Amino acid sequence: MGIRSRAVVDVTHMLQEPGARDFCVSFHVRYFLSASAAYTGRESLKIKATIERLPGGMMIVPLMLGCFLSNLAPGAPQFFGSFTAALFTGTLPILAVFYVCMGATISFSATPQLLKKGGSLLLTKLLCGIVAGVALGRWLGVQPVESGFFAGLSALAVVAAINDTNGGLYMALMGQYGKPRDVGAYAVMSLESGPFLTMITLGVAGLSAFPWPTLTGAILPLVIGVLLGNLDRDFRDFFGRAVPVLIPFFAFALGAGINLKSVWQSGLLGLLLGLAVVLFSGVLLFLADRFTGGNGTAGIAAASTAGNAAAVPALVAAANPAYTEAAKHATILVSASVVVTAITVPFLTAWWAARHPARSDS
């Protein structure tokens, strides 16, 4: 028997083995896909990486996209209807899911050091919001400024911008300049997420009262997520992976409700709001960090506005219609604060950490 005949017989016997045909089919599919990729000669477009180069990009870019589309084609949601319309108007359902998933990432097993550090920064953030709410509440009440340079500014905008820390930015900065326990402190600080603390702050400031069912409803999705994530670690991993995925979707829906004319008018005011958040909350957070044994770096790193804070004004207005007018402008101002603080805080943190490096935990 020749060499070629023996090879044919050997291959025939191989194909009769269990699983051999599945292997061959899998091999051919993989070969076809790799050959197709080589044929096209194209690499994957780095769209996501490009968006993430912008501070808060996964929040800001979809938000602006929704804003442009809704202003250029305001009748598009009604024209297409169904699921397409829901993408433009489904802010609240998406956020409800987001807070369940966010809550699942919060652990009960925080050590006393984490509770001390995270608790002090959380309470300081809350105190900053209350002080700002009381001061602006006496001047403005619940309504925004109607005219002049400060047109659109409201207590709601300022409190929402102050109350919620950019967790990803904080953990990245403390991973580089701080201690492991500083990074872990965000497990406690993440309780800031959502409209609950903002509602509490506005209530304490005497600006409005929210009935207890409304307050409970504002925090219930987060609590459900916390319980699920702590009862079953698989739930924590499962829901936790969805947190970054949901951000661009609720951001797009938020942007769809923004008027571009208002964005243009609020540009410089949003810049100043972001700088005010860094200066005002940064000083108090710095002192809180020093008081709990830190060198102040964690306090500076926490003086930012979270991307999802831009959703808070709409949620507060949904709970209390008295804030409807303020929420229209507050979303724009808070979005601007997200970008400004995300650019400013890393520079300040790096500058301070270079002069006061963190000591080892050992």
Image: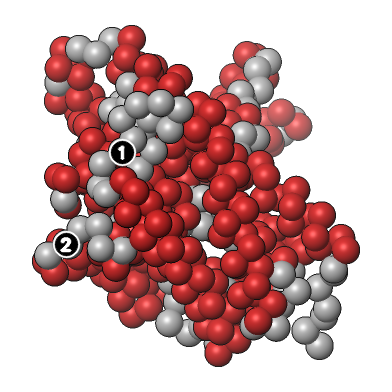
The answer to whether residue 98 is seen in the rendering is no
Number of numbered discs on residues = 2
Q: Residue at x 29, y 60 (%)?
A: 202
Q: Which mark is residue 144?
A: 1
Q: Position of residue 319 (x, y in %)?
A: 17, 52
Q: Position of residue 121 (x, y in %)?
A: 54, 72
Q: Secondary structure at mark 1?
A: loop
Of badges 1 and 2, nearer the viewer stands 1
Residue toward you, 137 or 20: 137
User: In this figure, which colouring scheme has been used for the structure?
Assistant: secondary structure
Choose the circle earlier in sequence order: 1 or 2: 1
Query: Callout 2: 10 Å neighbours few (<14), some, many (20+)?
Result: some
* 45, above or below 238, in the image: above
Q: Position of residue 268 (x, y in %)?
A: 54, 28
* 102, above or below 154, in the image: below
Residue 8 is left or right of residue 352, and the answer is left
Quadrant containing the C terminus is: bottom right
Q: How much space separates mark 1 and mark 2, taking CA atoms?
A: 19 Å
Residue 6 is left or right of residue 235, and the answer is right
| Image quarter of residue 130 | bottom left
Residue toward you, 1 or 51: 51
Q: Residue at x 31, y 63 (%)?
A: 205
Q: Residue furthest front?
A: 139
Identified by mark 1, the residue type is Pro
Q: Secondary structure at mark 2?
A: loop
Query: Callout 1: 10 Å neighbours few (<14), some, many (20+)?
Result: many
Quadrant containing the N terminus is: top right
Q: Residue at x 76, y 61 (%)?
A: 176
Q: Which residue is mark 2?
A: 210
Identified by mark 2, the residue type is Phe
